[in-house]
Amino acid sequence: MEKPLVSFCIPVRNTERWLRQAVDSALSQTWGQYEVIVVDDGSTDGTRGILESYGARILWQSTPPRGGNAARNLALTLSRGEWIQFLDADDYLLPDKIESQWNETNGFQDVDLILSPEWRETWLDEEAVGRTRQPVPDGHDLFEQWLRWEWPGTQGGLWRRGALESVGAWNQAIPCCQDYELYARALRQGVKVRWTQQPLSVYRLWSEQTVCRRDPKQLVEIKTALIDSMIDFLKEQNRWNDSLATAAGQTCFEMCRTLALTDLELATRYYEQRAARDLIQLTGPAATGRYRLAHRWLGFAGAERLARILR
């Protein structure tokens, strides 16, 4: 079976520290048919020099700063591949990422979006201090997985070009959760999704200045809007059920706890709003047995105050 061309699309802005590892991880793939496209979104560091050092091995283009989603969309426009692999410049792929996905799907047959779990690598100052493996979600309901926020980041998916183009471009209007917004559109359109079993990419947690980590309030607002939109869609399709409600409620509860780290008053209001819609479920890793006991006796705000003392 002839192997198709895979395009690696990498947006970059001022991440010279990690860029070479990201590009090298694409160039080092065991998959023979590929191209690497990098869009520099107005970097002011040493990014340009790094890109120039690759010569003809990559295609790259610089633009004024317009955001990561605009850079991804431009990279897609410049690409020629039948399959598209997006990769952020501060993450990287394992050498057999594409080859393994090919093998586990019998040559990309009957699938439009291939998802693989990721390694999540935490950095402190100048060194990696831990790595955890994202589990493959239990169950087969893709909507439930999405509502639990169990899908991988940008680098975990491999897209069939035709399916990606039918879903539409990356949404340049939102500053975070862009991958989940794109995944949501894919689910609504019935894109054929399949998981493989092995982690094949590394998502690096290294900066508090990313949009999602710098502004937890904005993160929760966007994430909540995406979840509510998906709930509305599922209800319109008569597909809403208790399992999906539990999944959405777990994610909303986790967001309550995220907000409580910086603003307990705001977190409590959010908790009450979600609870009024039956969208709070004390399940998942954020709801330990000790926390659930405290919540039963003290309520949400009291349980969070106790958690602060015990940290």
Image (cartoon, helix red, strand yellow):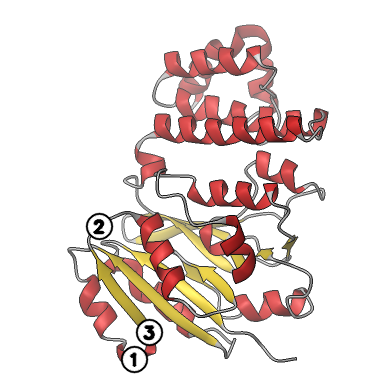
Q: Along the polypeptide, which appears first: circle 2 or circle 1? A: 1
Marks 2/1 in contact by CB < 8 Å: the verdict is: no
Residue corresponding to mark 2: 65
Q: Which residue is drawn at 41% across and 32% down?
A: 218
Q: Position of residue 35 (x, y in %)?
A: 47, 83
Residue corresponding to mark 1: 56
Q: Where is residue 104 in the image (x, y as percent from the top left)?
A: 76, 74
Q: Can residue 187 be seen in this view?
A: yes
Q: How far apart are marks 3 and 1 (CA)?
A: 5 Å
Extreme left residue here?
A: 44
Front residue of 16 and 298? 16
Q: Along the polypeptide, which appears first: circle 3 or circle 2? A: 3
Q: Distance between the residues labelled 2 and 1?
A: 24 Å
- Mark 1, other Cα within 10 Å: few <14 / some 14–19 / many ≥20: few
Residue 55 lies, with reference to residue 127, above or below; the image says below
Q: Residue at x 70, y 78 (%)?
A: 102
The circle on residue 154 is: none
Q: Distance between the residues labelled 3 and 2?
A: 21 Å
Marks 3/1 in contact by CB < 8 Å: the verdict is: yes
The circle on residue 58 is: 3
